């Protein structure tokens, strides 16, 4: 699927924070169909049992895709909100030290709420985890104190040559 833009990364977010030593440092791409995608790798430090990523960390990626999907849909990083509800289904064990792909897309929007469906796939297109998040739209000032500058926190735009990401999910 074709990439049409790239989103900024933050400093300390577990999923996208470039300064977070234990984080994923995932980079997010706006896709031609209005979705957002990220290629990423969980590490051994993210395991629950050996050879498996902790389910809470997979859920964290599903959650992150909520705001990211809002940005992809709006083609702007000015929309903000917080998670009101999150449901996650674990289909297969999530491996670490292997490139994975996550995708999120807005499926419903009202003036106050946004519903996002998100998925994590392996390189072969096998669905590992999927979920749905409902976000309530809020301004940055409603989320954090005035002392936090969201533009300062979301300060990294890492240029690259990614123009397409594989998205070939297998039928169930």
Image: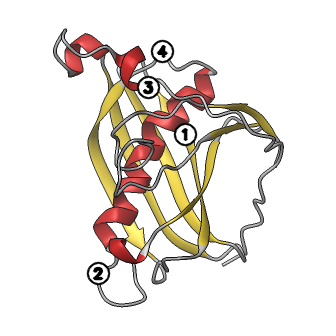
Q: Residues within 10 Å of mark 1 (few under 14, many from 20)?
A: few
Quarter of the figure that contains the C terminus: bottom right
Q: Are marks 4 and 2 in contact (CB under 8 Å)?
A: no
Observer-side mark, 4 or 2, equals 2
Observer-side mark, 3 or 1, equals 3
Residue 110 appears at what percent x and percent y? 43, 22
User: Which residue shows up at 79% across the image and 44% down it?
Assistant: 162
Q: Residues within 10 Å of mark 4 (few under 14, many from 20)?
A: few
Question: What kind of element bears circle 1?
Answer: strand
Q: What separation in Å lies between label 2 and label 1 (alpha carbons)?
A: 31 Å
User: Which residue shows up at 48% across the image and 77% down it?
Assistant: 96
Q: Are marks 3 and 4 in contact (CB under 8 Å)?
A: no
Disc 3 target residue: 154
Tell me the quarter of the picture where residue 58 sits: bottom left
Q: What separation in Å lies between label 3 and label 4 (alpha carbons)?
A: 11 Å
Tell me the quarter of the picture where residue 147 sits: top left
Disc 1 target residue: 107
The numbered mark, 3 or 1, whose residue comes first in the sequence reads 1
Tell me the quarter of the picture where residue 111 sits: top left
47 relative to 102, above or below: below
The numbered mark, 1 or 4, whose residue comes first in the sequence reads 4
Residue 127 appears at what percent x and percent y? 59, 73
The numbered mark, 3 or 2, whose residue comes first in the sequence reads 2
Q: Which mark is residue 78?
A: 4
Looking at the picture, tell me which residue is in the foreground, 34 or 48.
Answer: 48
114 relative to 88, above or below: above
User: As drawn, is 47 to the left or to the right of 29?
Assistant: left
């Amino acid at each position: 699927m074709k990439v049409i833009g790239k989103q900024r990364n933050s400093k300390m977010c577990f999923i996208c924070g470039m300064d977070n030593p234990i984080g994923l440092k995932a980079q997010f791409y706006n896709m031609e169909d209005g979705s957002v995608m990220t290629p990423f790798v969980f590490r051994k430090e993210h395991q629950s049992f050996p050879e498996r990523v902790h389910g809470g960390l997979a859920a964290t990626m599903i959650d992150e895709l909520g705001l990211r999907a809002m940005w992809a849909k709006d083609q702007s990083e000015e929309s903000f909100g917080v998670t009101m509800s999150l449901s996650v289904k674990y289909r297969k064990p999530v491996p670490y030290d292997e490139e994975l792909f996550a995708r999120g897309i807005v499926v419903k929007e009202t003036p106050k709420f946004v519903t996002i469906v998100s998925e994590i796939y392996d390189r072969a297109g096998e669905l590992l985890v999927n979920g749905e998040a409902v976000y309530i739209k809020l301004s940055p000032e409603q989320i954090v104190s005035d002392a936090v500058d969201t533009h300062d926190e979301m300060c990294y735009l890492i240029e690259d040559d990614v123009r397409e990401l594989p998205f070939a999910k297998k039928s169930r």
